Amino acid sequence: MRYFVAFLFLLLSTSFYGQETTLKRVSGTISSANTMLPLSNVNIINMNKAKGTITDSKGFFEIEATLNDTLHITSIGFQSLRVRVTNDWIKNGTTRIQLTEKAIALEEVVIKRYELTGYLEVDSKLIPEKENYRYSISGLPEGYEVGENSPNAFSRVVSSIFNPADMLYNFFGNKPKELKKLKDMKKDDTVRNLLETKYDRETIALLLGVEKKDIAEILQHCSYSDSFIQTANDLQILDAISQCYEEYRVLKKK
């Protein structure tokens, strides 16, 4: 009898644990903390599952999640928010979330005009031109971008590739799961569409567990030009880091 009770307790515990970790769909309604009105087109990304969705016209959303997953919620003009999926949320099936508006101070923008002469041959030399190139390296599927904003880039490429103590080597070697998550994100249309419109590096930094400034340093070690790092959207940055990681794996095998 004693063994039967112990077996029954073990069975119930296993069943309960299985229910907690089973993938479920949780839902919620997102509204403005100031007006209490529902917010449409709010982006929600499950940082653990690399899945995304958006709210409808009533602020409603539904997304796949398990216990303790983190949802990253963003909307233009509002403070981003991270929410953890709790037991109560899973049991109730839905929850209410409020976003706070950002206080944005607009800075003065000065637009400078070019002093053109009207002569094409002269004016073409007055307008700054940024040229970026990609060097091809034998053994790698892709090249490395350099340009006038990336001095001595080619020598940096060679030194970074053949220096095993390089920051890039250490970073990629320590974060294989996070980098795989970046690749999985590209498969989700909602996440891709979101990253195409973002330039703040916030989502990518959270996924990799690094500071925003570290992303620029990573891309510099991959020899991307400063102009690319500053102007690319988050999806392009995601592709660049993923490509650099694949090149790192090739070098590691060799």
Image (cartoon, grey):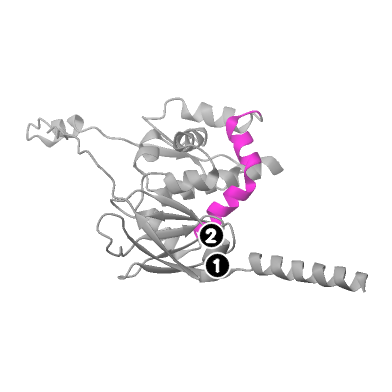
Crowding at dot 2, Cα within 10 Å, few <14 / some 14-19 / many 20+, comes out as: some
Looking at the rendered structure, the kind of residue marked 1 is Ile
Q: Quadrant of the N terminus?
A: bottom right
Report the front residue among 244 and 76. Answer: 76
What segment carries the magenta color? 165-186
Amino acid found under the numbered disc labelled 2? Val
User: Which numbered dot is residue 90?
Assistant: 1
In the figure, is residue 8 to the left or right of 136? right
Q: Is residue 112 left or right of residue 179?
A: left
Q: Is residue 128 visible?
A: yes
Q: Residue at x 52, y 39 (%)?
A: 210
Q: Is residue 132 magenta?
A: no
SS for dot 2:
loop
Instruction: Look at the picture and state if 73 lies above or below 147.
Output: below
Tag 1, which secondary structure?
helix
Residue 181 is left or right of residue 3, and the answer is left
Main SS of the magenta segment? helix
Closer-to-camera residue (106/126): 106
Q: Is residue 140 visible?
A: no
Q: Which residue is the extreme one toward the left?
A: 118
Precedes in sequence: disc 1 or disc 2 = 2
Q: Quadrant of the C terminus?
A: top right
**Residue 179 rendering spot, x and y as whole percentages:** 58, 48
Residue 132, located in which quarter of the rendered image?
top left
Label 2 belongs to which residue? 85
